[in-house]
């Protein structure tokens, strides 16, 4: 038991180390930069607080200069990734950990604007069917490989290789037909059709830039120890237990929003898998771990009251956590019934009670930090009278012995599938069930374990399904609302569109979304996505509840915990321990 | 009507009029035959358990391909899913898959985990130690607690009996996950004496999980043991020993303990099995790596090879523990030794 | 192949066991019955005194758990009469109210009255406990009797089958049943019952075998008594008593088991109140709202302990006689 062999163990580092003491230099530069950093963070807080994005309970700056060294223990409540390379599959648990050791070509800020990161510059062709990307010339991966044009070619080829089993990544480079080397540091991407979300795709950690030397080892080896340019590197991975990350001492590619330059302060991060919410919070309280994620609302409240603990909660981009309504069958094939359901339930009361007011309401299908999101509180407000009126209009006028509405002898009833993994706790459904009953609408709750939840979702065997989709672009709407994503090749297979709407209303949505995805004008893109959202809202295809969030709790002596745009993943590059 | 159906009585009937030599040879033959039966029986049990689990996992809703694609949260397209199925032979007819599974099992190959992408044998090898340490320590602790309580309350008069009885009954009725949570709240969060999770190396991280698993079991064992202990302490043998001036303490240690232990030993085989089930809960509450958590996780994500591996492994452990508890029972009970 | 496991070593002396069947032992002891056969007028006082005698005859070991059990049964039978509000009545504005005069056991995350939910939850929880035990024991009686009374081949077959079930992790069996049938009170009950069955069956088999191999059964055979006679007069009475005790012990264990399944997310379906699911949901709030775990937990322990004590009491009573 003590001699567990990690699944992967890094070989002794042979990369050249930087001369001199990193501590002295970083501390020096930081002291100069500090006021600016604090101001920037403050501004960021003010900015995002308007959108309800970031809540930090103690925004006071560190009391002294950052200290280098030490080990940070991070406990994640998300599932353990099957592969540490987020190209393979491409999910949130992978994004959480790989943000520490992998970096993408571009940086996208809180306002959705794309800027350089590993890429120095880029240039679109006139027909927008070719994109030239020039990378920095001073970047080496942690295995010594230099970043160059060839790297991009190999990365795209790796994503597109069916054996890699990429899901998120392969969608991101869907329109990239081929990549060509123009010069040592410039590559040209040829597109099959214009894609105005391409830069955003290359700003996700799901499409990171990895060492071509490491990729050549094949997916299996690369899964155990992906090699990137990030502030940390993968040292070892003991499955079902922890990933050990060590500092990249040659690091010099911090994101534009980073608080310092040079290597990270922390020497080591132990990334533990601690799925039980109560145990994870107890471990934080007792000081066994320094940072936890998936902080539960009740624990956020407790952490705010505890001087030894701090919290950092921020939104993630994409399709918000919502209840998607299945329009392919009774009763949600009638838009009046869909609206009536949405109007009958009280989301605000649920957020106030169950989430203890720690999670702000979303009134948009797009997250509050996703570009072009359009909050529409009028559409999603509770209105019991209107719900009753709509149901009467829709012909559900008779009542049965239990007080539920009926039409042609059939009860107005729908089934919600629920699983703990999809962030909407069953108590929310219980409250919705209660309020839906008040308008004569029966809501049956089917609590599922994750695999059967998915099986039912694939088979369209639900009336209501809680869903979300993380993506740093309004083009997430193209994935989850375009009716082209309804059919599935095999019955019971995956489908990205879960509302199933077809007909003229769906055609209008499709048209707006497709135009929005291809237009060359950012202004027109915004207008088209606004129009698409308006159409989606009108059809009541889903009930937005709240933004997906990164919810961190940490010991108060952990300084410089930040969330990294655009996915809102935690980054520990600026983090240090204020412990003597 | 034939009433003598129990095969264990065969050793009685063999001996009678034969010479010593033939008797010894016959006995050896019987032992060999019984051993052979046992091995065959064990293999049969393993086969049946594996088969049962294999087909049961096919009845479970959900697609095992999700486990291969990183769990139920994946957004893999249907093309990727189909490619994955083909890559892992999940598109073949069920019986072909069963045949190839059995063929591999016979050679000791448990296959590769869908989710962890490691050989199942390696996954289980890593986790087994953790769970065994937990289970064995919990069993030992439960024995100590139960014996201590039984000894104390069997000798301490009416009030002690009542208190002992209540303690046992209540602790046997406490759900593991609740007890574990309470222990964490008291000893980790409030007092900060012990870690809430088993991340730290060393014995500290083991104390709370072991107690959580041991306390309900101790209550259960204690109830069983105290009954037979009381009977033993009031038996004619005990009364005559007392009359001969033997002290109460020596009596309970020498005589009653052995009687008390007897049903307990018999139960230990059962207890080991229930400890594995209990380990699922305890390993989840304390975020401890182990077979229990692996089993739960693999069932939930439909990581079929791991589920089957755990099932075969637990069955094997069960067979071994039953054998050991049989031997221990024979050793503790002279009546069985004579047979 | 393996030695029988005696969970309850009650009936060890067949001679003694033969003489008594399980009927209420109290009435025979009552001195009034033994006294002069003068017919007494049935007054209220005499009823009370009779009841008193009945109770004193039972002893506190049975009375206390019996009274508690009656309370629980009352909660299960007529919850609406005992609970101040319905189990589903919610008021999110009153979420997480601490126990007080308005809400004795406080309120949960949706402002539901925990006391009312605990009372209403008695039905599901007790039903799970009792039915699971009935399913488990029922299956076990059939299997155990088949093994114990059938031919050698039947015994061999059933015993091997039991061995396979035994070697199969109980929790996995429950997990599979639940994932195949879908979660809910009924599924939980079946799952818990089935996973308990092999254990019971083995005990029953060994009990049947030990009675069957006893001297007095052999004597009956020598006397030429029919098989049915032997089963009815020797085997059933000897097996029934420990079975009854097993059942009372099993109910408590089944309730605890079911709550563990709830904890693993495989329990009763919401929003029906059930102690196990209340407890496992409340566990998340253990640091903020202790009452959400304390009261359902208390009732689980209480009901499990009650049935166990009752079982012990009856067991001792039978032995004393």
Image: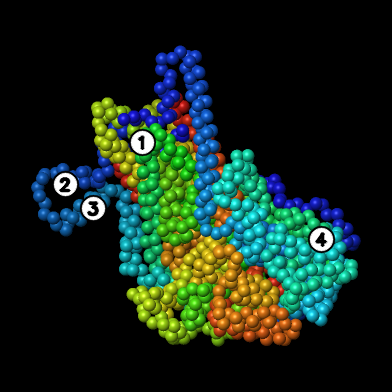
Q: Secondary structure at mark 4?
A: helix
Badge 1 crowding class, 10 Å Cα cut-off, few under 14, some 14 to 19, many 20 or more, is: some
Q: Which residue is mark 2?
A: C32
Looking at the image, which residue is at 76% across and 70% down?
A176
Q: Quadrant of residue A136?
A: bottom right
Per the rendering, the mark at residue C52 is: 3
Pinpoint residue A215: horizontal percent, then vertical percent: 78, 59
Residue A62 visible, this angle = no
Circles 3 and 1 on the same subunit: yes
CA separation, marks 2 and 4?
98 Å
Q: Secondary structure at mark 3?
A: helix
Q: Which residue is mark 4?
A: A212
The answer to whether A561 appears left or right of C148 in the picture is right
CA separation, marks 3 and 4?
89 Å
Pinpoint residue C122: horizontal percent, then vertical percent: 38, 61
Sooner in the amino-acid sequence: mark 1 or mark 2: 2
Asked if disc 2 and disc 4 are in contact, CB closer than 8 Å, the reply is: no
């Amino acid at each position: 038991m003590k001699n567990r062999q990690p699944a992967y163990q890094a070989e002794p580092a042979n990369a050249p180390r930087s001369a001199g003491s990193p501590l002295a230099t970083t501390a020096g530069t930081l002291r100069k930069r500090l006021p600016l950093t604090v101001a920037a963070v403050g501004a960021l807080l003010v900015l995002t607080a308007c959108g309800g994005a970031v809540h930090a309970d103690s925004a006071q700056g560190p009391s002294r200069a950052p200290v280098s060294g030490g080990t940070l223990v991070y406990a994640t409540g998300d599932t353990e990734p099957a592969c540490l390379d987020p190209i393979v599959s491409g999910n949130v648990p992978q994004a959480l950990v790989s943000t520490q050791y992998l970096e993408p070509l571009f940086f996208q800020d809180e306002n959705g604007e794309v800027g350089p990161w590993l890429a120095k510059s880029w240039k679109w062709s006139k027909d927008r069917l070719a994109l030239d990307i020039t990378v920095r010339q001073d970047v080496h991966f942690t295995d010594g490989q230099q970043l160059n044009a060839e790297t991009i070619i190999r990365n795209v080829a790796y994503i597109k290789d069916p054996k890699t089993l990429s899901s998120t990544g392969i969608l991101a480079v869907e329109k990239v037909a081929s990549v060509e080397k123009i010069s040592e540091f410039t590559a040209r991407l040829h597109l099959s059709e214009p894609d105005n979300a391409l830069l955003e795709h290359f700003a996700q950690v799901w499409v990171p830039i990895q060492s071509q030397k490491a990729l050549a080892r094949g997916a299996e080896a690369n899964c155990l120890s992906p090699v990137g340019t990030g502030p940390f590197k993968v040292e070892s991975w003991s499955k079902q237990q922890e990933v050990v990350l060590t500092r990249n001492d040659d690091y010099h590619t911090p994101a534009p929003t980073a608080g310092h330059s040079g290597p990270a302060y922390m020497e080591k991060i132990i990334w533990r898998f601690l799925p039980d919410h109560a145990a994870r919070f107890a471990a934080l309280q007792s000081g066994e771990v320094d940072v936890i994620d998936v902080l539960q609302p009740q624990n956020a409240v407790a952490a705010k009251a505890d001087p030894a603990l701090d919290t950092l909660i921020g939104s993630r981009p994409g399709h918000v956590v919502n209840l998607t309504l299945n329009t392919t069958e009774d009763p949600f094939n009638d838009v009046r019934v869909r609206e009536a359901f949405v109007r009958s339930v009280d989301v605000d009361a649920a957020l106030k009670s169950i989430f203890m007011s720690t999670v702000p309401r979303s009134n948009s299908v797009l997250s509050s930090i996703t570009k072009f999101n359009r909050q529409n509180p009028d559409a999603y407000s509770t209105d019991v009278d209107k719900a009753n009126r709509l149901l009467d209009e829709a012909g559900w006028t008779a009542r049965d012995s239990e007080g539920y509405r009926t039409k042609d002898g059939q009860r107005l009833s729908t089934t919600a599938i629920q699983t703990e993994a999809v962030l909407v706790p069953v108590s929310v459904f219980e409250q919705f069930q209660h309020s839906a009953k008040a308008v004569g609408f029966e809501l049956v709750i089917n609590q599922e374990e994750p695999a059967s939840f998915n099986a039912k979702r694939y088979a369209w065997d639900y009336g209501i399904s809680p869903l979300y989709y993380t993506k740093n672009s309004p083009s997430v709407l193209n994935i989850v609302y375009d009716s082209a994503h309804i059919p599935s090749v095999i019955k019971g297979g995956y489908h990205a569109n879960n509302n199933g709407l077809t007909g003229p209303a769906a055609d209008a949505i499709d048209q707006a979304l497709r135009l929005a995805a291809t237009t060359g004008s950012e202004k027109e893109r915004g207008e088209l996505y606004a129009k698409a959202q308006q159409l989606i809202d009108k059809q009541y295809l889903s009930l937005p509840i709240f933004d997906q969030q990164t919810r961190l709790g940490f010991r108060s002596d952990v300084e410089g915990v930040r969330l990294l745009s655009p996915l809102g993943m935690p980054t520990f590059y600026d983090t240090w321990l204020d412990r003597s | 009507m034939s009433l003598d159906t129990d095969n264990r009585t065969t050793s009685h009937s063999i001996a009678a009029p034969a010479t010593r030599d033939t008797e010894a040879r016959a006995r050896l033959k019987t032992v060999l035959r019984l051993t052979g039966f046992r091995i065959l029986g064990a293999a049969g049990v393993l086969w049946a358990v594996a088969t049962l689990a294999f087909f049961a996992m096919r009845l479970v809703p959900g697609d095992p391909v999700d486990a291969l694609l990183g769990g139920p949260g994946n957004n893999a397209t249907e093309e990727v899913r189909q490619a994955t199925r083909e890559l892992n032979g999940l598109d073949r007819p069920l019986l072909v898959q069963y045949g190839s599974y059995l063929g591999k099992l016979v050679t000791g190959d448990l296959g590769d985990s869908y989710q962890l992408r490691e050989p199942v044998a390696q996954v289980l090898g890593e986790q087994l130690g953790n769970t065994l340490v937990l289970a064995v320590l919990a069993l030992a602790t439960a024995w100590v607690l139960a014996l201590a309580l039984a000894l104390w309350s069997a000798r301490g008069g009416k009030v002690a009996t009542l208190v002992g009885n209540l303690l046992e009954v209540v602790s046997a009725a406490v759900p593991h996950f609740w007890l574990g949570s309470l222990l964490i709240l008291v000893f980790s969060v409030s007092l900060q004496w012990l870690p809430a999770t088993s991340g730290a190396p060393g014995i500290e991280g083991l104390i709370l999980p072991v107690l959580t698993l041991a306390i309900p079991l101790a209550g259960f064992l204690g109830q069983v043991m105290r009954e037979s202990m009381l009977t033993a302490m009031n038996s004619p043998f005990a009364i005559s020993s007392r009359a001969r001036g033997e002290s109460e303490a020596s009596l309970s240690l020498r005589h009653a303990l052995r009687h008390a232990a007897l049903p307990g030993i018999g139960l230990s085989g059962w207890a080991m099995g229930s400890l594995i089930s209990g380990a699922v809960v305890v390993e989840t509450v304390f975020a401890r790596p182990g077979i229990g958590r692996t089993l739960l996780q693999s069932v939930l994500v439909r990581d079929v090879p791991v589920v089957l591996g755990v099932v075969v492994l637990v069955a094997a452990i069960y067979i071994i523990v039953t054998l050991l508890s049989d031997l221990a029972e024979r050793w503790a009970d002279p009546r069985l030794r004579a047979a | 192949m393996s030695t029988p496991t005696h969970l309850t070593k009650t009936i060890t002396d067949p001679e003694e066991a033969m003489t008594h069947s399980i009927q209420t032992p109290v009435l025979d002891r009552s001195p009034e019955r033994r006294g002069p056969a003068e017919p007494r007028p049935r007054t209220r006082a005499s009823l009370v005194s009779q009841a008193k005698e009945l109770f004193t005859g039972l002893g506190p070991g049975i009375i206390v758990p019996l009274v508690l059990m009656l309370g629980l049964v009352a909660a299960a039978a007529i919850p609406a009469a005992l609970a101040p509000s319905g189990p589903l009545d919610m008021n999110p504005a009153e979420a997480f109210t601490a126990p007080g005069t308005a809400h004795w056991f406080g309120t949960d995350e949706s402002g539901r009255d925990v006391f009312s939910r605990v009372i209403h939850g008695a039905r599901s929880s007790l039903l799970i406990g009792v039915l699971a035990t009935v399913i488990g024991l029922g299956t076990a009686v059939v299997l155990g009797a088949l093994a114990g009374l059938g031919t050698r081949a039947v015994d061999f077959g059933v015993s091997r089958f039991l061995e396979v079930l035994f070697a199969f992790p109980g929790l996995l069996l429950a997990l599979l049943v639940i994932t195949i049938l879908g979660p809910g009170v009924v599924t939980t009950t079946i799952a818990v019952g089935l996973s308990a069955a092999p254990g019971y069956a083995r005990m029953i088999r060994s009990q049947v075998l030990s009675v069957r191999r006893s001297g007095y059964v052999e004597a009956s055979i020598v006397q030429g008594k029919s098989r049915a006679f032997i089963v009815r007069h020797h085997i059933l009475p000897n097996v029934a008593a420990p079975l009854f005790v097993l059942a009372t012990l099993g109910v408590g264990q089944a309730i605890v088991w079911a709550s563990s399944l709830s904890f693993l997310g495989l329990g009763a379906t919401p929003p029906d109140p059930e102690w196990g699911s209340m407890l496992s949901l409340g566990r998340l709030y253990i640091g903020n709202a202790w009452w959400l775990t304390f009261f359902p937990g208390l009732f689980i322990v209480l009901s499990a302990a009650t049935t166990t004590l009752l079982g012990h009491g009856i067991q001792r009573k039978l032995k004393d006689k």
